[in-house]
Image (cartoon, grey):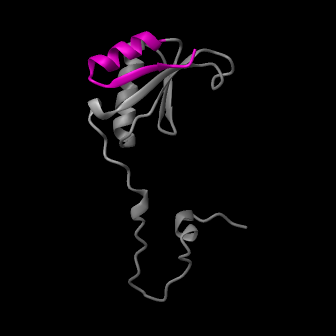
Amino acid sequence: MTKSKNKNQYDRGIVYSTNPEFQFNDSQNTEPQTLPPPQQNLRVLLDRKLKGGKKATLITGFIGSSADLAALAKQLKNLCAAGGSVTHGEILVQGDFRQKVMDFLLSKGYKVKLSGG
């Protein structure tokens, strides 16, 4: 079985069209609009599972475009002077920076809660 370049097209049942002017329009893959900071409910937690037992600060609950999420992640990584990544709508900053991240997000107007133990 070969993998399709446009897998979503096959997931929706469109395999072939006899219309030579047919354009596949995938309107379901549009990114959500970024909510303003007071409407965001972010969770900040310490995670030891993703990095092989090393401590990492995980920020979840961001609703918005991937570009805005990446920009926020860059600000947080610069603030903490640490590496990190953005995956599946979550920001991962290497190291235990929960309080520093929480203070920064609160100063930007986000609703933030510490989560986990």
Q: Nearer the viewer, residue 104 or 40?
A: 40
Q: Residue at x 49, y 84 (%)?
A: 17
Residue 51 as seen in the image, left or right of residue 87: right
Magenta stretch, residue numbers:
97-117
Q: Position of residue 115 (x, y in %)?
A: 51, 20
Asked if residue 102 lies left or right of residue 49, the reply is left
Q: Is residue 85 left or right of residue 41?
A: right
Q: Is residue 98 magenta?
A: yes
Q: Is residue 114 above or below residue 13?
A: above
Q: Residue drawn 27% across and 17% down?
A: 107
Image quadrant where residue 71 sits: top left
Residue 67 at what x, y percent from top left?
36, 40
In the picture, residue 62 is in which quadrant? Answer: top left
93 falls in the magenta region = no
Name the quadrant containing residue 73.
top left
The quadrant of the picture occupied by the N terminus is bottom right
Quadrant of the snapshot with the C terminus: top right
- Image label count: 0
Query: Taking 28 as reference, is 14 above or below it?
Result: below
Residue 38 or residue 19, whichever sits in front: 38
